[in-house]
Image (cartoon, grey):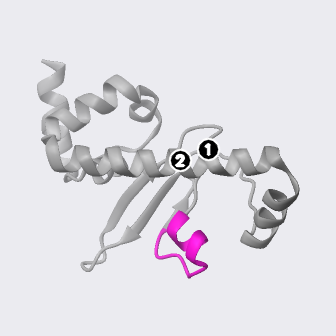
Amino acid sequence: MRLFYYDQNGEEQTTFLCAQNGFIASFSSLINQTKATENVECITDCELLKISYINAKQLVDKSAIFKDFFLVMFEKSISSATLRANDLASLNADQRYQKMIDEQAHFIQNIPLQYIASYLGIKPQSLSRIRKQIIK
């Protein structure tokens, strides 16, 4: 699955990619109880479980296990967003793609290249160029 929004030019910008057995949400909208500006798309066959904020809150209030689960999900979300922001600011496109190959090779095999390019903050043509250089 992927989380994305439309930029001012109407182009899709992928902000998060989720692997099998992952957890995906627009956390800022969930926390602030506002309408999400991001969209969720299943890009492969998925079995999706959905929970409302009210039901999640009730589970957290009643169960220490669910409280721990949601805390871990928020921690992972914050860590992932921070690492991605740091990568976008400090690594060039080649380095970002190489890091994805090294750390998330399953994404490369299962996600269409236009979504990977968007997630890496580059155009699909640039990703094609990078991929050709790596193959040599």
Relative depth, front residue between 131 and 92: 92
What is the residue that sits farthest to the top in this orientation?
136
* Image coordinates for residue 24, horizontal then vertical, percent: 58, 53
* Image coordinates for residue 89, horizontal then vertical, percent: 17, 50
Dot 2, how many residues are within 10 Å of its Cα: few (below 14), some (14-19), or many (20+)? Answer: few
* Image coordinates for residue 45, horizontal then vertical, percent: 64, 45
In which quarter of the view is residue 87 placed? top left
Is residue 106 shown above or below 59?
above
Relative depth, front residue between 109 and 14: 14
Dot 1, how many residues are within 10 Å of its Cα: few (below 14), some (14-19), or many (20+)? Answer: few
In which quarter of the view is residue 108 placed? top left
SS at circle 1: helix
Of the numbered discs in the image, which one, if any, rests on residue 62?
none
* Image coordinates for residue 135, horizontal then vertical, percent: 18, 20
Relative placement, left or right, of 83 versus 124 is right
Q: How many labels sit on residues?
A: 2
Task: Give the CA separation, mark 1 to mark 2.
Answer: 5 Å
Q: Residue at x 47, y 35 (%)?
A: 110
- The span picked out in magenta is 27-38
The answer to whether residue 20 of the structure is visible from this angle is yes
Write down the residue under mark 1. 72
Q: Residue at x 32, y 32 (%)?
A: 100
Name which residue type carries label 1. Answer: Val
Taking the magenta stretch, the answer to whether it contains residue 5 is no
Taking the magenta stretch, the answer to whether it contains residue 35 is yes
Write down the residue under mark 2. 75
Relative depth, front residue between 87 and 131: 87
SS at circle 2: helix
Relative placement, left or right, of 70 versus 84 is right
Q: Residue at x 43, y 52 (%)?
A: 16
Is residue 41 shown above or below 32?
above
